[in-house]
Amino acid sequence: MKYGIVGATGRVGTLLVNIIKNSEDTLGAVMFTGEQTVEFPSDTVITNDAKTLLENSDVVIDFSAPVATQKLLEAALENPKPLVIATTGLNDHQKNLMIEVSKKTPILYATNMSLGVAILNKLVSMVSEKLRDFDIEIVEQHHRYKVDAPSGTALTLAESCAKARGLDLKEVMVTGRSGHVGARTKNEIGVFAVRGGDVVGRHTVGFYNDGEFLELNHTATSRETFARGAIKVSKWLINQGPGLYSIEDALNLKD
Ligand SMILES: NC(=O)C1=CN([C@@H]2O[C@H](COP(=O)(O)OP(=O)(O)OC[C@H]3O[C@@H](n4cnc5c(N)ncnc54)[C@H](OP(=O)(O)O)[C@@H]3O)[C@@H](O)[C@H]2O)C=CC1
Ligand SMILES: O=C(O)C1=N[C@H](C(=O)O)C[C@H](O)C1
C-alpha cells in the first residue's frame, strides 16, 4: 500500500515515516510546509500541495494542523482517497467539510489513535450514565509544545459523558474557574488542560460524589502508540465504502 502522510516532519509524522520505511508498504508522498528535517526514501514525492499528495497515495494519514487538514479535505473533494485524520483542534467548518468529503470516500476521524483511549471512551460513557449524580471533571496533561486546548481526546471524552446524560456539551462544559465563580452547578462538566515537559498524553476522567469518587485514567507513554494505531486503522479503512468512521468501527468495539 502507498501511504501519503500530512505532517511527515512532525513528532508523530516522523514516527509514521520510520514505521512505513521499515514495512512492506511504500511511502508514496509526504506533505509539510517548512524545513525538511526527515530523510525520505528517494522515490517519495515531497510536496506542500494536497492534490499532488492525494494523486500519489492509496491512503492518507494526517497528523498535522487544522489548516493543513482543511487543505487536504478541500483537495479530496476533487480527488477522493481514504483518509485517516488524527489532527485535533478542528473548527466546525472543517468538521462539516469532513462530513461532505466522507460522502465520496471513507474517512476515519479519531482524536486519539490508541486502543486504551477507545476503551476509556466506552467506560466513561457507561459510568456517566450509571453514576448520574456524580460530578464529572476531566483533566488532560500534555507536553509543552501542544498548541490546542483542551485536547481533542478530552473533548471527545467530555462529549461521551454529556451524551450519556442527554446533555449538550456546549451548554455544560466549563474550561476554567477563577475568582468568585459560585458553587458548582449540577450538570457542569469541567475540562482542564495542564501543559509541561514531555508528557505524551494523560487523560483522567473523574466522577465525584459525597463519600466516594471514581477516577479513570489513561496515560500514553510513547507516541508510537498513536502512529501504530493510525496504520492499523488505515488497513481497515481501505476496504470500506464512503462514510465517516470512528476508531470504534475500525476496532470492532461497537455494541
Ligand atoms: N489522534 C491522535 O491519536 C493524535 C493526534 N495528534 C494531533 O496531531 C497533530 C500533530 O501533532 P504533532 O505531530 O505533535 O505536531 P507537530 O507540530 O510536531 O507536527 C505538525 C506537522 O504538520 C505540519 N504542518 C503544519 N502546518 C502545515 C500546513 N499548513 N501544511 C502542511 N503541513 C503542515 C508540520 O510541518 P511544517 O511546519 O513544516 O509545515 C509538521 O510536519 C496535532 O493536532 C495533535 O493534536 C497528536 C498525537 C496523537
Ligand atoms: O498533541 C498531542 O500530543 C496529542 N494530541 C491528541 C489530543 O489532542 O487529544 C492525542 C494525544 O493525547 C496527543
Image: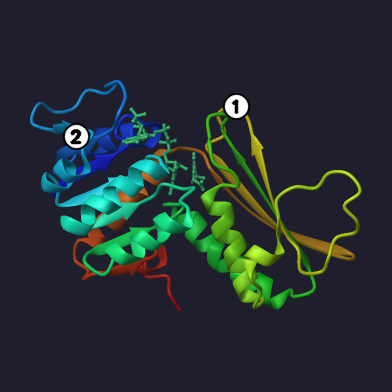
Which picture quadrant has residue 120? bottom right
Residue 192 lies, in percent from the top left, at 69, 47
Residue 191 is situated, as x and y percent measured from the top left of the image, at 68, 52
SS label for mark 1: loop
Mark 1 = which residue? 197
User: How crowded is the residue under tag 2: few (<14 C-alpha within 10 Å), some, or many (20+)?
Assistant: some
Quadrant containing ligand 1: top left
Quarter of the C terminus within the rendering: bottom left
Q: Estimate the x, y position of residue 156 in percent, counting from the top left.
A: 54, 59
Q: Secondary structure at mark 2?
A: helix
- Give coordinates of residue 234: x percent, y percent: 26, 55
Front in this rendered view, residue 97 or 115: 97
- Which residue appears at 29% of the width and 32% of the height? 32
Count every numbered label the image shows and give the total.
2
Q: Is mark 1 within 8 Å of ligand 2?
A: no
Q: Which residue is mark 2?
A: 21
Question: Closer to the N terminus: mark 2 or mark 1?
Answer: 2
Say which of marks 2 and 1 sits in front.
Answer: 1
Where residue 5 is drawn, which disc sits there?
none
